[in-house]
Amino acid sequence: MAISKLEIYQRAILHCRQTPVTSLSENNEARRLCDIHYAPMLQSLMEAGFWTHAMRTTQITANASVTSAFGYAHAHDIPADFVRKYVVSASEALNPPLDYHTDGRAYLIEGGYLWSDVTPLYMRYTSNDASYGLDLGKWPERLTEAACVELACRIVPKLTGSSELQGNLMSLKAIALGRANTFEALQQPTQASRPGRWMTDRFSSHRSSLDYRWA
């Protein structure tokens, strides 16, 4: 069931045990507080998990106008809608991930760029684009509830002044976010575990450097 911004406001205010607004233009403190905290709440929520509807895969190429005096050879522009990195790879199939390199030089995110000795790169990440993470019509109910409680936590100190209610909402927030993350994890395919450093070092001399499972 699709959710709307107004419904998030209403449910957040109800969590604060107050009368919910009936429109986004209603002239009262509850609506004004929701307006202030809505965008930061969304950003915080996008950073809090790998939400299936928010995941986006794109190719990023080296920025020819940026050069490095030392270190990595290529600087790649970070997408404008980037929130949280899921995987970076030199393969469009995202397999193997560059993270499987054990020399500590797979890549580096710094200064608004993704630095690497390989180009182009393919990155899957959480996106806050209006067609991805911020498309409320794609939100599962567990994520919606987490958003409503998060917003309630932000507005309740000013709206009610109740430290007891704020404490209860903080506990409810942790539960709601945990449920949302658990639900999302079940939507993803099972991932093979990456071998530990001891296993990598023990067997790397017997494996090709192109075999990411061991190199």
Image (cartoon, helix red, strand yellow):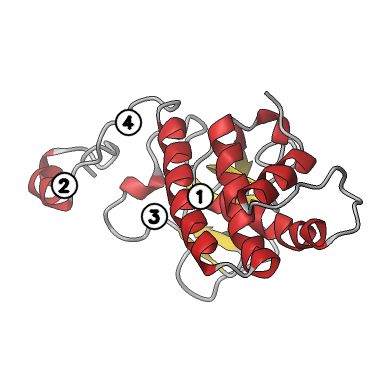
| Sequence-wise first label, 2 or 1 | 1
Per the model, the C-alpha gap separating discs 2 and 4 is 18 Å
Please name the residue shown 76% across and 47% down the image: 20
| Sequence-wise first label, 3 or 4 | 3
> Are the residues tagged 3 and 1 within 8 Å (C-beta)?
no
Quadrant in which residue 215 is drawn: top left
Give percent across and percent down for residue 116: 48, 57
| Sequence-wise first label, 2 or 3 | 3
> Are the residues tagged 1 and 4 within 8 Å (C-beta)?
no
Kind of residue indicated by mark 4: Gln
Please name the residue shown 39% across and 41% down the image: 97
Residue that mark 1 sits on? 85
> Are the residues tagged 2 and 3 within 8 Å (C-beta)?
no
| In the image: residue 35, left or right of residue 167 | right
Front in this rendered view, residue 162 or 210: 162
Task: Find numbered disc 3 in the image and state the secondary structure of the residue it sits on.
Answer: loop
Give percent across and percent down for residue 211: 26, 36
Please name the residue shown 53% across and 34% down the image: 142
Residue that mark 2 sits on? 200
